[in-house]
Image (tube, rainbow, N blue to C red):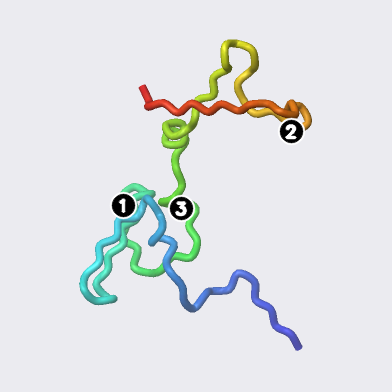
Amino acid sequence: MDVRIKNGSPLHGESLCETCSRAHITRGFSESQKVVVCQAIYPERHVPFKVCDCTSYLEVKRQSLKQMEEIAWVLTPREGKRKAGFVPAREMEEESEIELFLSEPE
């Protein structure tokens, strides 16, 4: 007889709070000296256990729309001959030239 459990409780693993930008984590010198405060809810709450799923999770490594706009390249047409942007490969000329100008943000 096969027994399958879906979405069961994991017995180990890192807490989701470790990679959440809304978590305030204070660590001491030993493993037991750790305080996690969730700042995604109001009022902020102490989280006394490892979290495996959270509806307010926001990954630290993910950039916001504003941050992505700040690092984006601005494509401008060369002397008005072409539209700025990407062209499908089938529309490229055999020996077309690609120019890339990098400038400091204004």
Between the residue at mark 1 and the residue at mark 2, the CA separation in whole angstroms equals 52 Å
Residue type at mark 2 is Ala
Q: What residue did someone put label 2 on?
A: 89
Mark whose residue sits in front, 3 or 1: 3
Circle 3/circle 1 CB separation < 8 Å: no
Q: Residue 33 placed where, x, y %?
A: 24, 72
- CA gap between label 3 and label 2 equals 39 Å
Q: Which numbered marker is on residue 57?
A: 3
Q: Quadrant of the N terminus?
A: bottom right
Q: Amino acid at mark 3?
A: Tyr
Viewed as shown, does residue 44 lie left or right of 51? left
Under circle 1, the secondary element is: loop
Find numbered disc 2 in the image and state the secondary structure of the residue it sits on: helix
- How many angstroms separate mark 3 from mark 1 (CA)? 14 Å
Q: Position of residue 100 (x, y in %)?
A: 53, 28
**Is 6 positioned to the left or the right of 67 in the image?**
right
Q: Are marks 1 and 2 in contact (CB under 8 Å)?
A: no
Which corner quadrant holds the C terminus?
Answer: top left
